[in-house]
Each structure stands twice: as C-alpha cells, then as structure tokens.
C-alpha cells in the first residue's frame, strides 16, 4: 500500500507539478552524460537516489516518471522493516541537511515551488515521524492527567491530530486503488499505528545520524513467500 | 446567520452546474435555457422553507448524483474522493445526510462491484464512507465542544418568505409519509427517464435514498416542510435529463417533464387542499 501510494500517486504528482523528485525504488534510468555532469552520486548518503533526484533538479534537469511497474519484495518482518525505514529516514535527513546548507541557492536552483516541495516531501517526511510521538504524548497526557494544553490549544491539537491521521489513513486507503486492489483499502485504517512504527524508525534514524551517519543498515531480501508480479 | 449573498451564490452555482451538465450532454442553447428557466422556477420553492439550507442540500444532492454517476461509469480514485466529499457535504448541510449516506454508500458499492468478492466491496464501501464519517465526527465534536450548530448558522433572510405549508399534520410520521408521497410525484421526471435510460438509474437511486431519508427523519421527530426538499428534487430531475442526453426524447417531451415537475412542486406546496 505504501509503495502503491508513493509510485502511483505521489511521484506522478511531483512529476506533474515539476517539483524535485526524491528518487527511489529499483528502476531508475539515467542518461550517463547527465549523471557525469553532476559528478554522479554521493556515496556517503544512504539514500543516494533521493539525493540524486534533488541534485538533478538543481542543475535544471527534469526527472520524469514512466508508466511501467517494477515489482520488488516488500519487507515482511518488523525488524527488517524498521532497519529499512530508519535507513531511508536517515538518508532523507542527510539529503535535507546537505541541500539546506544554502537555502537561498536551493531556491535559486530549484525555484520556489521546488523549494517548498523539497521541504514537504524530504524535510516533512522525517520531521513528521519525529514530531508524531510528541503530539501523541501531549494529547494523552492532557487526557489522562488534565491539561498541559487547555482551551483553544487543546482543540486545535486534537483536530490537528485527527485531521493528520485521518488524511494519512485516507491516502493509504486510496493508494492501492489504481491497481484495483480494493481489498487492501480497509487496512489503511491502521495508518495511525503504522505512523507510530515510522516514528520508532525516525528516532532510530536520528540516533544513527549522530552516531553512525554512513552506516548502511542492509535490508534482508528473499524472505517473502510471495514471489513474482501480482 | 447567512446573508442574502450566499443564498444567491448557491442558487447561481446550482443553475450553472445543471447548465454545464445539460450543455455537456448535448442539449442546444434554446432547449437548455428553457429547461433552466423551469429549474429556477422550481428552485424558488426554497422560499417556503429555510432557503439557504434547502438550496445547499439541492446543490450537494446534485453533486452526489453526478459523482455517483461518474463513479458508476469508471472507477478512479478521483471519482471516489469526489463522491466521498459530496457525501461528507450532505452531513454538513442537512441532518438527512446521515441517512442518505447510510443508504447510498452500500448501494453504490454493491451496484458497482456486483459479482466481485465481498472483501472488494467492503474496500470500496470503507473508502466511500470515510469522508462522510469524518465529517459527521467533526460536526459532533464541534457541537460538543463549542455548542456549534450549522442549522442555526444557515438560517437566512429568505427563510419562509412564502409561508405556504399544506401538509403539516400533527403526527411527524404521517407528515413525513405524505411529504414523501408528494416528493415521489414531484420526482416523476427522474423515474420516467430512469425507466427509459440506464444512465439515469444512479440519479433514481440517489433520489430514492433522499425520499427514504425524508420519511426516516420524520419518524425521528425531525420533520421538514416540502420546501426543504423540493429544490433537491428539482436538481435531481434536471440531472436525470442531462444524464439521459437530448437523444433520449423529443425536446417537447423534455420541456413537458420539466414543466410538470415545476408546476406540481408549486401545487403541492402552495395550493391549499
């Protein structure tokens, strides 16, 4: 569901809006002259493909999505999934830090729309993962022990929490729609729990960014019982 | 409290929406203008009720019917979102929205995916219900936390300008049943077109859901005057004509149907028995 939402809706959306695309997945095709012109990829970034998408946009090259599918194995154990996601989030943190060394240059290179898209899709991804448990903690503390938050702040927080989780659940449900996998839609309602796990991965990513920034947490493959295209 | 301008805006939006649908279906300028005149005449029945809510419900019900029709033709995520958002809007503009959604969402999920495995129907149903349920929860929260009531907010200066209300017996159930019977007759163009043309059947389904909701609301002691629903029937009738297209009948027949609907609406509402 995650992949379907990302590859079927969000990336084509970024493509249509001409917003720098954090590349990923198993099928990226490059023109080698373009790749050489930007001095290839950053070997220290653990999501070098995401970083590459932003760098291509910064030199004025356009990344497009192709209407084709490459199936890949989804992780099917919690430990494996946490390692994979924390590596991705750490890579997004690295990418954000690298490109935000000079925000003004980034705006000049990628344009204002590109800059905002970069903040939302790269910065927002790891920031929301890190902030999510803090918001839950504030909410639960005020409900159980009575209010660090009161009045308007409490209402805004509750509505924000409900709207954020609701929107993400709805997007998760819509994700598999294009492929006709409607039977998966109800599982989208579990999105708030998924987000708590993403937050665990985010915390792990932040810790690793500080302690082992270039460590590549490998994802074990070949574990899934389902092989081949659906 | 709603001022005059929002009511006029809703009125204009609804007429424009039906105009676009009629023109897109291939109706000529002259025929479209005649039909729109009849529509406007019928929409003015809103003046016998809380006019802004009646017009808003009419607009939203037309959007529900149009988006349900689109979804029935082809399932895309955008159409699911549009229908879900339209159903969510019904929760906001009228209490009948809850019942309309409770009837319509399962009906549409089953209609569209008949023969599909149940789990796929359940998937579509959950998708269709998500936004309306979220809207209903938000309204409940606002009502609980702030004593916020949309019904009060939507009162306006055009409300009950015409005070004619024929069917208003003491029993809400009887009132609802009589209202529903009158609305069934008012919606004659919908049934007629749906009987002849498959494309208009979704509009008939939406109309049926509205009628059931009217009766159910009456039994729940939330009776409304005919004028609250007649504009919705107007929107749905003209939408049915648009769905069927100009080739479905002679222009005179379309005009007759539209005129019948407008005249019968005013007769039921304004002429004493």
Image: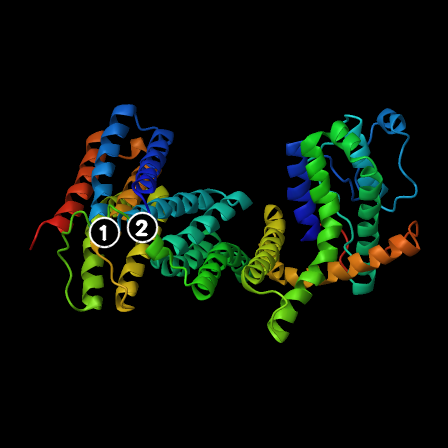
**Residue A180 vertical placement versus B31 (above, below):** below
Camera-side residue: B39 or A184? B39
Q: Chain of mark 1?
A: B
Q: Nearer the viewer, residue B233 or A202?
A: A202
Same-chain status of marks 2 and 1: yes
- Quadrant housing residue A156: bottom right
State the colouring used for the structure image.
Answer: rainbow
Q: Which residue is mark 2?
A: B53
Q: Would residue B244 be seen by someone viewing this image from the given angle? A: no
Q: Is residue A30 above or below residue B49?
A: above
Q: What residue does disc 1 label?
A: B49
Mark 1 crowd level (few <14, some 14–19, many ≥20, 10 Å Cα)? many
Task: Point out residue B176 in the picture as x, y percentages from the top left corner.
Answer: 22, 62
Residue name at image x 75 percent, y 27 percent: A108
Q: Secondary structure at mark 1?
A: loop
Tell me which chain the residue with mark 2 is part of: B
Foreground pick, B229 / B92: B92
Q: Position of residue B243 (x, y in %)?
A: 35, 39
Q: Residue at x 30, y 52 (%)?
A: B155
Which of the 4 quarters of the picture holds residue A200?
bottom right
Q: Real-space Cα distance between discs 2 and 1?
A: 9 Å
From the image, which quarter does the C terminus of chain B lie in? bottom left
- Looking at the rendering, which quadrant does residue B105 occupy? bottom left
Q: Residue at x 20, y 38 (%)?
A: B41
């Amino acid at each position: 569901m995650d992949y379907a939402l990302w590859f079927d809706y969000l990336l084509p959306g970024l493509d249509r809006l001409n917003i720098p695309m954090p590349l990923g997945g198993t099928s990226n095709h490059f023109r080698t002259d373009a790749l050489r012109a930007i001095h290839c990829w950053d070997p220290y970034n653990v999501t070098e493909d995401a970083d590459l998408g932003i760098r291509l946009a910064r030199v004025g090259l356009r990344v497009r999505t192709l209407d084709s599918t490459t199936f890949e194995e989804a992780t099917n154990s919690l430990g494996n999934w946490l390692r994979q996601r924390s590596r991705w989030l750490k890579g997004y943190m690295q990418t954000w830090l690298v490109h935000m060394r000079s925000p003004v240059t980034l705006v000049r290179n990628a344009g204002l729309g590109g800059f905002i898209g970069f903040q939302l899709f790269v910065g927002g991804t790891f920031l929301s993962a890190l902030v999510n448990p803090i918001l839950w903690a504030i909410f639960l503390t005020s409900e159980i022990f009575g209010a660090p938050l009161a009045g308007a702040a409490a209402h805004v927080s509750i509505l924000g929490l409900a709207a954020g989780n609701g929107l993400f659940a709805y997007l998760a449900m819509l994700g598999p729609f294009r492929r006709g996998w409607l039977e998966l839609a109800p599982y989208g309602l579990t999105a708030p729990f998924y987000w708590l796990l993403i937050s665990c991965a985010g915390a792990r990513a932040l810790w690793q960014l500080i302690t082992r920034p270039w460590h590549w947490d490998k994802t074990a493959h070949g574990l899934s019982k389902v092989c081949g295209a659906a | 409290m709603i001022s005059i301008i929002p009511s006029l805006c809703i009125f204009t939006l609804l007429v424009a929406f039906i105009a676009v649908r009629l023109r897109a279906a291939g109706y000529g300028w002259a025929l479209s203008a005649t039909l729109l005149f009849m529509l406007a005449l019928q929409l003015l029945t809103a003046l016998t009720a809380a006019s802004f809510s009646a017009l808003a419900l009419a607009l939203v019900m037309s959007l529900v019917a149009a988006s349900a029709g689109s979804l029935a033709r082809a399932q895309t995520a955008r159409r699911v979102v549009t229908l879900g958002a339209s159903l969510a809007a019904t929760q906001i503009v009228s209490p009948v929205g809850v019942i309309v959604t409770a009837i319509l969402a399962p009906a549409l999920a089953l209609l569209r995916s008949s023969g599909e495995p149940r789990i796929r129907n359940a998937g579509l149903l959950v998708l269709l219900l998500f936004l309306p349920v979220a809207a209903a929860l938000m309204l409940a929260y606002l009502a609980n936390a702030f004593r916020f009531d949309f019904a009060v907010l939507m009162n306006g200066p055009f409300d009950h300008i015409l005070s004619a209300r024929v069917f208003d017996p003491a029993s809400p159930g009887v009132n609802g049943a009589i209202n529903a019977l009158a609305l069934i007759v008012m919606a004659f163009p919908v049934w007629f077109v749906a009987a002849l043309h498959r494309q208009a059947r979704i509009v008939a389904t939406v109309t049926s859901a509205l009628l059931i909701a009217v009766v159910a609301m009456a039994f729940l002691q939330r009776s409304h005057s005919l004028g609250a629903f007649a504009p919705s029937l107007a929107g749905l009738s003209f939408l049915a004509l648009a769905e069927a297209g100009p080739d479905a009948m002679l222009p005179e027949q379309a005009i007759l149907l539209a005129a019948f609907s407008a005249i019968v609406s005013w007769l039921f509402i304004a002429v004493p028995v």
